[in-house]
Amino acid sequence: MRQFEFILRRILTSLFVLIGVSIMTFFISRVIPTNAAAMYIGPKARQEDIDRVTKQLGLDKPLPVQYMIYMNQLLHGDLGDSISTKRPVLVEITSRLPASLELLFSGMLLATLIGVPLGVLSARWQGKLPDTGVRAISIMGVSMPAFYLGLLLQIFLFRDLHLLPLAGRVSGDLQFTHPIQPITNFFLIDSLLTQNWIALKDVALHLVLPALTLAAYPIGLIARMTRAAMLEVLEQDYIRTARAYGIRDSVVTYLYALKNAISPTLTVIGLTFAYALTGTFFVEIIFDWPGLGLFTVRSLLAVDYPAIMGMTLLGAAGYVLINLVVDVLQAWIDPRISLK
Amino acid sequence: MEIDTTVSVPQVESTRTFRHVLAVIARDPLSLASTIVIVLFVLIALFAYQVAPHPDEGAGKTNVSNTMLAPSWDHPFGTDLLGRDMLSRVIIGAQPALIVPIGVVLFAVLIGAPLGAIAGYKGGWVDEIIMRVTDLFLAFPSLLLAMAIASALGRGLDKAAIALVVSWWPWYTRLTRGVTISLKERYFVEAAQAVGVNDWVIIARHILPNTISPVLVQATVDLGTVILAMGGLAFLGLGTQPPAPDWGLMVSDGRTYILNQWWIATFPGIAIFVVVLAFNLLGDTLRDIFDPRQYR
């Protein structure tokens, strides 16, 4: 019951945060620019267009009224039309969402699969060579700009070793030889569902470099958090008891200790999602990945204001949602949290 | 996301002074090396125009007869498409890429720390208002917020810097508030209250000076991240505008030629990596001495 209450309370706070987020984006999009109407039309704004948009957005009205108009549009899913593509921003975003999510989840999965074992290894051999090695890897991972790491990987794995494709989501000729039927628009899932093995291999190979680039930073953070949490757990009495019973060291580490160290690690995984969200922007440019990041960056360059503001709002909303999910998951894994 | 890390009221030990920090850094070879690297980079950045072999090309003057030269004795980092000496451009590019982020963190601290001290000391509705406002800012991924603000303000180095300050100050408000709440219980603050010292004087004279060490540590840890963010904004074309040099912008320019003229993107990229690595290594050691996160 307590857990249920906690989750409900957490959902309510998230709603308040979302309202706060909408106030922030309202200010950034309508109040900060000296001529918001002109920014919504684009570079070739005529006076009558500016007057029309000023009326439409209610920019001549007092701020609270403007905010109500803004909220009303938001709740109707109206984020305005993109200046460069002339299509509704919401359509542009939802059509690109699967590509970005596929990259984001692959990257985070990779980061977890590499980061957690590295952290465990580091804790088990504390102060020894593996620990130092993992520390070096994680510090380098968080120090490397994603946009530079992507280039390095392209040089070595594409140009020098010819191992992986340079960029893009699929090979150019795949749509003629083994086209992927769009079902979910997550290419991995779609090619699996239709048992299109050649496409699956092609998609997976294209995913490796971008996902790895995206994962570099989270790997460092996750490894260090896992290490810290493991070290704390390994000092507990019950671990000593387990050891005293003669249970094998590996069983103690991987089964008994890791289970209780996973909760703080989960928090860090949630937090790094925020990084990964903006990280995809750089990764998508480098690897020409047809997702939201590439769209956002093109919008930034073209000063496509409605698109930029739509992405900002969506990014923040996604972040709030991820935090909510992590908190709920944590309360579920560790019921003590909901008692606080 | 609230992680409960409440520790019993942290007592800042008198040994943990500035001199103590210097001693620890001097004993640890990695931290010492990082400090030297940072000081060296900052000095080079400050005297960029005196150090650069071709300051005019570094600033943007083209030299088409030298286009795309590979690294050599004359041009250790090679030249770019417009024939400009890359070494000079990396050196002058250190100003927006390194000095500006230091300024960004400084301003974020100057805005964030006093607000945090006021929130923590006054408590009540003042605290409530200040902290709810920081929550608004922290609801966004920092870089996303910075991108949105930078594009609302228009392109340029100054605008990117302002955008970063706006999205970073709340972190210092949170930190300082935590430190202030634990300082409030200390005898010297209670003594000042007892003799009737004005609240604002207590905050300015007794609270803020004692928050400096954790804030300084956090600032060092954050600098790496802010340099990366600044590089990212420049890479996206939201920071420094050409022909002026900036590491992030140069990596972006060199991206087109990465498979053949690898040097154009490589050296500015390495510069970012090395400087951020140095700040992270140093920040790591500092965090071990006094963990600023214990106050959150």
Image (cartoon, coloured by chain):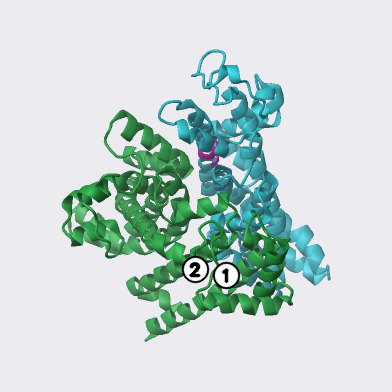
Residue that carries the numbered disc 2 in the rendered image = A317
Label 1 Cα neighbours within 10 Å, binned few <14 / some 14-19 / many ≥20: many
Q: Are marks 1 and 2 in contact (CB under 8 Å)?
A: yes
Residue toward you, A260 or B103: B103
* Chain of the residue on which disc 2 is drawn: A
Residue sitting at x 71%, y 69%:
A51
x and y percent of residue A325 in the render?
A: 40, 70
Residue sitting at x 46%, y 78%:
A11
Residue sitting at x 54%, y 26%:
B81
Left or right of B180? Residue A339 is left
Residue toward you, A31 or A120: A31
Mark 1 vs 2, N-terminal side: 1
x and y percent of residue B287 in the render?
A: 53, 48
x and y percent of residue A150 in the render?
A: 41, 40
Residue B275 sits inside the magenta stretch: yes
Q: Which residues are magenta?
A: B274-279
Quadrant housing the C terminus of chain B = bottom right
Chain identity for the colour cyan used in the image: B
Mark 1 residue element? helix
Q: In the picture, residue B92 is in which quadrant?
A: top right
